[in-house]
Image (cartoon, rainbow, N blue to C red):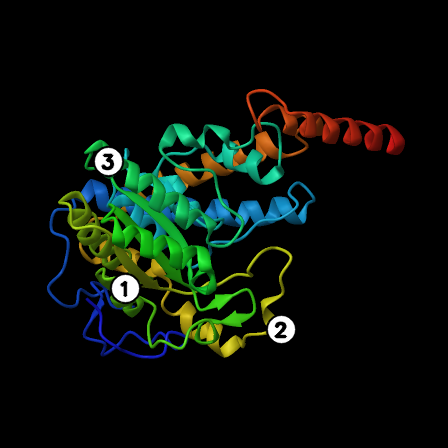
Amino acid sequence: MTKPGVQSGNAELQGIETAVQVLDPSGNVVGDRYPEKLTAEQHVAMLTAMRVARRLDAEFVNLQRQGQLALYPSCLGQEGAQVGAATALRSTDWLFPQYRELGALIVRGLPPEALGQMWRGACYGGVEITDYCVAPVNISIGTHALHAAGYAMGIRFDGDDDVAVAFIGDGSMSEGDVHEALNMAAVFGTPCIFFVQNNQWAISVPARHQTHSETIAQKAFGYGMPGIRCDGNDILACFVAMGEAVERARAGGGPTLVEAVTYRMGAHTTSDDPTRYRSEEELAVWAERDPIARYSAHLVAEAIWNDNAEAGANAAADEAVRRLRNDVFDAPEPDPLVVFDHVLAERTDELERQRRQLVREIDTTS
């Protein structure tokens, strides 16, 4: 359980007794919570996933700048939180992502081209992600927390020991849907983990203006569930925090609120200009806490990351970028009328009316 620490907008982790940290910014082990069960192969896979996520993230931005995507929200700087949390889960645990969870989706093995088609808005883009126990990517802030809580309720009724994870951000803590989800999950004791990536900025609003509580994790007290605060730029801390929450949920201990304190290094989306609301000095401070540099330094020091691992990671990133670009660039536009084919099994009169209206509008502008 967490105790009051510092203002969530400051997010300085040093000296907070309740914050989980395994690696300091230089990659040195601190404390006694190192996950010894991780094998060298798993460490290499985690850092590789982070490296692939960063390369794909940059390519998504490039594709948007080239007019191939209408919008893209970068996960730059948050790879450690996402990969660490997702690695602590089973493949049968359900993820309910918002729009910035590229690292978690890579861990699940989603094809980059499926994600590209989704962001392009192409026909059936991203539909197959449910095959990976991942719910459709959510754009509206916080609504998917209720989906996760409801799914977790079903898990409990079925008597399974899987879990559901809602990936949400600090800005979502200002949304009523999230509070309803937290309350429902706690009341019904559901196996649901709420993984909050506190990246300091909800578009142009700093986290300290999203809440007056000293941390996000301490909000768990109000719902009667455990809360964990961890260093979100420390992949191993995120793995440990999520692992503890998952173990509790599988054992029937109910939900947990995890706050991963990280930082959004890029813009909120490709339509945003972060220089209008944050300083270069702030960005420089967080750049020194880069999650990939931190984990790389640790694995090199432990002789786990070597030339073969480096070559493998580069090859994996190259292939992912190639698949994304080849599938997305100048891909055919979908038939806009197809949106009416997948709302209900049989179209209602109202949907038919809307479809006819769209047909007339398309004919008028053709």
Which kind of residue does numbered mark 1 sit on? Ala
Image coordinates of residue 124 in percent, x first then y, are 56, 27
Circles 2 and 3 in contact, beta carbons < 8 Å:
no
Residue 68's quadrant in the figure?
top right
Q: In the structure shown, which secondary structural element does the residue marked by tag 3 occupy?
A: helix
Mark toward the start of the polypeptide (1 vs 3): 3
Q: In the structure shown, which secondary structural element does the residue marked by tag 1 occupy?
A: helix
Is residue 199 shown above or below 109? below
User: For the residues marked 1 and 3, what is the alpha-carbon distance in whole angstroms?
Assistant: 23 Å
Q: Which mark is residue 220?
A: 1
Q: Which mark is residue 276?
A: 2
The residue drawn where x is 52% and y is 61% is 266
Mark toward the start of the polypeptide (1 vs 2): 1
The extreme front residue here reads 349
Category of crowding for the residue at label 2, using alpha-carbon neighbours closer than 10 angstroms: few (below 14), some (14–19), many (at least 20): few
Q: In the structure shown, which secondary structural element does the residue marked by tag 2 occupy?
A: helix
Category of crowding for the residue at label 1, using alpha-carbon neighbours closer than 10 angstroms: few (below 14), some (14–19), many (at least 20): many
Residue 66's quadrant in the figure?
top right
